[in-house]
Amino acid sequence: MEYFFCDTGAELPETYRYLAKLEAVLGKPIARLNAERNFAHYFEVFRGTLPSPQMRWCTSLLKIKPLEEWIGEEDAVSYVAIRADESNRKGYVSTKPNIKTRFPFVEDDIDHAGVVRILEDAGINLPEYYKWRTRSGCYFCFFQRKAEWVGLADNHPELFEKAVAIEQKTLKDAGLDGDASFAASGMKGRQYTWSDGETLTELLGRRDEIMRRHAESMERAKKKRKNLPLMEVLSDALDDDDETTPCTVCHL
Ligand code: SF4
């Protein structure tokens, strides 16, 4: 059994810390697979177009390509950790005949509570980012929910600012001079902004409204399913403003 992590170079600090914990428990190294070129390079290649759920060049170039190159032509089984209660999610399914895919949690009927139990029994618990975000992935990941963007601004302001800078470059390249110009242009489309329908600075300007709605969702989630651990309530509440379900290639 070999362990790997496709590292885009833009992962959260909490993710890197969690990988170190996992390595200690496994007693084996987790290979870090870096693409030959980084996000900045491909951002230029795609002429400043942001990746989006519709145009997900980041996953193919920064996650899947390095993985397939690492495996090469040898026969391999890729174990994908989709849980039994999320079997509608997509995981990495190889297009290469030498890589077979298995879904052990689905096969063994291990659900969310089962995974948490395994992590607790192993003494590593959940990653720290669960306090404000339920998924790993790049700090600028466009699958982030609005409340999670606010969480990024609060927990990693410097990373939030970097995401703002990337977005502002996209707007500038599209001939738009900042947020007001974007709002006035009537231009829609995820290729211009990380989050749907607004820039990150506009989103942060709505912080109070977003967090109020998030708190309401948390209340609803708590009432819907009583005695849930906070982490599951958070997950349910965030799902309320989820637009697309990401695949497990990117998210732990
Ligand atoms: S985590 Fe998000 S931004 Fe990063 S490669 Fe995956 S889909 Fe793209």
Image (cartoon, rainbow, N blue to C red):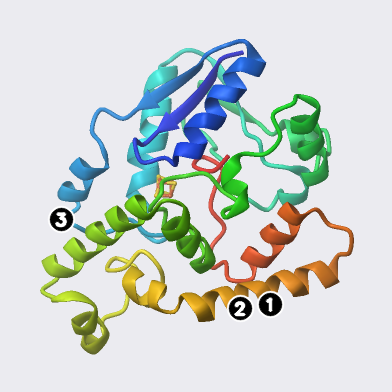
Residue 148 or residue 112, whichever sits in front? 148
For residue 216, which numbered disc appears in the image?
Answer: 1
Q: How far apart are labels 2 and 3 at the CA level?
A: 36 Å
Image spot of residue 35 (x, y percent): 31, 30
Q: Nearer the viewer, mark 2 or mark 3?
A: 2
Sequence-wise, which precedes: disc 3 or disc 1? 3
Number of residues whose C-alpha sits closer than 10 Å to that of mark 1, classed few (under 14), some (14–19) or many (20 or more) = few
Q: Position of residue 53 (x, y in %)?
A: 43, 59
Residue 32, quarter of the rendered image: top left
Q: Secondary structure at mark 3?
A: loop
Report the residue at 47% width, 64% height from top: 150
Residue 188 x/y as whole percent: 31, 79
Q: Are marks 1 and 2 in contact (CB under 8 Å)?
A: yes
The residue that mark 2 highlights is 213
Give the residue number, with chain letter if any, for mark 3.
Answer: 47
Quadrant in the picture for the C terminus = top right
Can you see residue 158? yes
Whole-percent x and y of residue 218?
71, 69
Label 3 Cα neighbours within 10 Å, binned few <14 / some 14-19 / many ≥20 = few
Which residue is at the front of the view, 110 or 26? Answer: 26
Secondary structure beneath label 1: helix
Q: Amino acid at mark 3?
A: Arg
What is the distance, in whole Å, between disc 1 and disc 2 at their CAs? 5 Å
